[in-house]
Amino acid sequence: MNRIKLYISIFFIGTFSISAFSQIPEFDKLEMLYSQQHYKLVYRKANNLLDVPDYDFSMLPIYYKSISLFQICQNERYLSKHPSALLEAKKLFTEVKKSGDGKKIFQAHENEIAFLKNDLLAWSEELRRSENKETFDQLQLIMKDLFDFVPNIDNQGQVKEVANKTYKATGVIRNDLANYAMTFIGTPYLWAGTDPKGFDCSGFTGYVLKEFKVNTQRRAVDMQKECIEVKQKNAQKGDLVFFDNGSGISHVGMIISEKDQPLVMIHSSSSKGVIITELDKSEYWLNRIHSFGTYIK
């Protein structure tokens, strides 16, 4: 009788492990909270699960502890208090990558990891611009060691490129801004780039606005503070849209669509340079919208 119970237990555990990615409420909760950018909460909950032997069969708690820590590290204040946190995140991610279930986890969470890579690329840009060489160099090694296999988000169907097309004018200045911005489609991305040889995100929007006698702050976060806030429903051509990856303003684009129409922006993406993106068709960008602003009075 005991032998039968043992066989049943072994069968149950094996079946449980195979379906673990989708049938454990605690794991589903981690995924949901991570998608909502509650990174510190995900980190704590994943850490707590690691103390419960019942979950030792899966690497998912380690996976979520790692990717949430990568996001948390982008907070300058947190990283200054926890200088080894970035290396800890790397160590955890490497542990998952080398495990037997690593490939399955990465396949099941492909978009999640692609989003993380995009956030880390944006952070890397900010580090370079602020001349934080130590953290920048550390992050470059991590990206090379861990994320080379991860496709760029623009190749995942999350950001759709749109053919260069004309939008009905709402005003001479706004229309001219949008048309001028679109002449740079295809310009390569360049860290700290501020001219047509190559742009980063704020370098591109700043360059376009400067052509119309509008001088802006250099960083996206400073642009957001400087410009006039606009409600999303009122956003229109020439206005700026700012994005937050959970650790502060990390990207900026320029709206080129009409007011009351689906939002379309032009921006310098870290993987494809200056492109056009329909926001309502991009899970990545739509979920990270922070605010809208304008320099046009």
Image (spheres, rainbow, N blue to C red):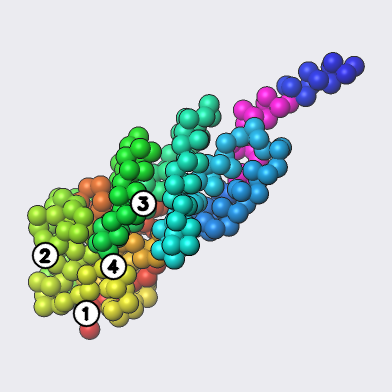
Q: Secondary structure at mark 2?
A: helix
Residue with the mark numbered 2: 180
Tell me the tag on residue 103: none
Residue at the image point whose x is 29% and y is 73% from the top: 222
View extreme (right): residue:
1
Give the residue type that dot 4 points to.
Ala
- Asked whether the residues under the numbered discs 2 and 1 touch, taking CB atoms below 8 Å apart as contact, a structural biologist would say no
Position of residue 94 relative to residue 167, above or below, is: above
Identify the image quadrant of residue 208: bottom left
Work out which quarter of the rendered image holds the N terminus and state it: top right
- Asked whether the residues under the numbered discs 2 and 3 touch, taking CB atoms below 8 Å apart as contact, a structural biologist would say no
Q: Is residue 93 toward the left or the right of residue 125 in the image?
A: right
Q: How far apart are labels 2 and 3 at the CA level?
A: 30 Å
Q: Is residue 18 toward the left or the right of residue 280 in the image?
A: right
Residue at the image point whose x is 84% and y is 15% from the top: 3
Percent position of residue 141, x then y: 33, 43
Q: Earlier in the sequence, mark 2 or mark 4?
A: 2
Residue with the mark numbered 4: 220
Residue with the mark numbered 3: 120
Percent position of residue 233, x then y: 37, 72
Q: Circle 4: is it few (<14), some (14-19), or many (20+) Cα within 10 Å?
A: many
Can residue 118 be seen at all in this image of the molecule? no
Percent position of residue 24, x then y: 65, 40
